[in-house]
Image (cartoon, rainbow, N blue to C red):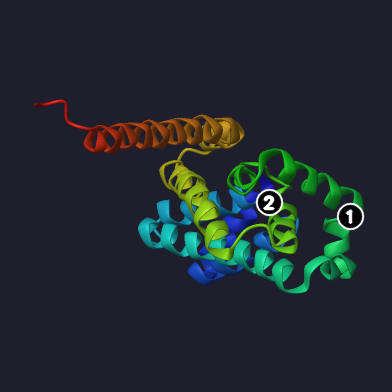
Amino acid sequence: MDLLERLVTLFAENGYASVFIALILCGAGIPLPEDVTLVAGGVIAGLGYANVHVMFAVSMVGVLLGDAGMFLLGHHYGARILQWRLVARLLTPARYAKVQEKFERYGNRLMFFARFLPGMRTAVYITAGTTHRVTFMRFFLLDGFAALISVPFWVYLGYFGADNHEWLVMWIRRGQSSLWVLGGILLLTVLVLWWRHRRRVAAGHAPSTEA
């Protein structure tokens, strides 16, 4: 957890702006774990250096801007972006082909699930832009919905565990699997509500049997 401690020190000294910039850089694919960055933001709020609700808002904006930037770069430059030196290190031709194959298999759902796949997010978002198979608004909604699950989870985890290092470390290690469970529950809830809505609409349009 040396990285977490270094980030906590950096964020405590520089405030919200440092968290925001770090999350933009996470979206750009630098080797800085987004989950640890979010937890560090929550920890400094728990230690009294920031307001946790403001930290959540700042983190959401930073995460979404970072993701949107990668999508828009891919959308604007297309496959030419693969020739950029920094992008080429992150997204090799073989990896690009693999992500495209996953798009063929999972469709737009991949953009939602990518948020819960560390190391895959940036590659997926760039590829989503280059393929021109999805509009920016759909990308933003899918990514935003996923971020509404992951971002508060990590930020508030750091906030509540700021004074209990062992508990915090345990939940960071468990966090990714816990996010999958939480995401599954929320997705199932949305599907059930959608199905009930469809039934009500169908019942409302059913022909009357009265004489």
Mark 2 residue type:
Arg
Indicate the secondary structure of the residue bearing disc 1.
loop
Residue highlighted by disc 2: 121
Residue farthest toward the front in the current orientation of the protein: 211
Residue highlighted by disc 1: 92
At horizontal 66% and vertical 61% (from top left) the residue drawn is 27
Q: Quadrant of the N terminus?
A: top right
Mark 1 residue type:
Thr
**Classed neighbour count for the residue bearing mark 2: other residues with Cα under 10 Å, few (<14), some (14–19), many (≥20):** many
Residue 166 visible? The answer is: no
Q: Is residue 171 above or below residue 42?
A: above
Indicate the secondary structure of the residue bearing disc 2.
helix
Q: Is residue 8 left or right of residue 97?
A: left
Mark 1 or mark 2, earlier in chain: 1
**Residue 123 % position (x, y):** 75, 54
Between residue 182 and residue 31, name the one nearer to us: 182
